[in-house]
């Protein structure tokens, strides 16, 4: 009887620790204003064994700022969000919302006009487990 209870508890632990993948995986192809000005841009790198690639650009169009993820790809996670951060870690950041998809071109509106000299990182972060998936250092384009 003890063995059955042990196996049952072990099974519960295994199921509860299973990594959920809640972010949509269908590739997005959101459009970007062709007249938009690129303020800063950078390339993503994965962190802590995660695979993240693509480009992050902050653009201005019609007086509004947006973060654009181009040719973006990441492995999935349960609660992935897009941040603009002052550091390469999720401290002192602006949450732009949940990641729309694990692949493709996606656009995130930035409220206000943050100082992009200070907010110089785009991050992909799992809020549920406080786990950083990837970052892109943003700098003025050449």
Image: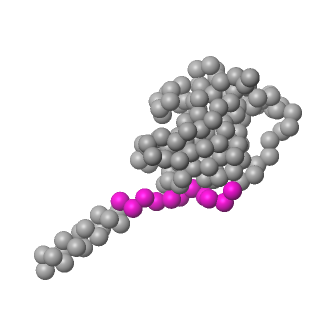
Residue 62 counted in the magenta span:
no
Front residue of 108 and 131: 131
- 106 on left or right of 125: right
Answer with left or right where residue 19 lies relative to residue 39: left
Q: Is residue 127 left or right of residue 16?
A: right
Residue 15 is drawn in which quadrant?
Answer: bottom left
* Position of residue 14 measured from the top left corner of the image (x, y, whole percent): 32, 65
Q: Is residue 18 left or right of residue 124?
A: left
- The image shows residue 70 at horizontal and vertical percentages of 70, 43
Q: Quadrant of the C terminus?
A: top right
Task: Give the magenta range.
Answer: 17-27
Q: Nearer the viewer, residue 101 or 114?
A: 101
Q: Residue at x 12, y 75 (%)?
A: 2
Which colour style is shown? one colour
**Coordinates of residue 49 in the picture (x, y in percent):** 45, 46
Residue 101 location, x and y as percent? 63, 53
Mark yes or no: residue 88 visible.
Answer: yes
> Which quadrant holds residue 81?
top right
């Amino acid at each position: 009887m003890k063995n059955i209870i042990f196996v049952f508890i072990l099974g519960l632990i295994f199921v509860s620790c299973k990594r959920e993948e809640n972010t949509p995986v269908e590739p997005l192809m959101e459009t970007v204003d062709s007249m938009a000005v690129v303020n800063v841009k950078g390339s993503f790198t994965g962190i802590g064994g995660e695979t993240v690639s693509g480009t992050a650009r902050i653009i201005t169009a019609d007086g509004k700022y947006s973060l654009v993820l181009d040719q973006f790809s990441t492995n999935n996670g349960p609660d992935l969000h897009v941040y603009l951060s002052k550091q390469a870690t999720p401290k002192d950041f602006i949450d732009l919302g949940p990641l729309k998809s694990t692949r493709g071109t996606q656009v995130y509106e930035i409220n206000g006009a943050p100082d992009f000299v200070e907010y110089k990182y785009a991050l992909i972060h799992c809020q549920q487990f406080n786990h950083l998936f990837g970052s892109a250092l943003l700098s003025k384009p050449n």
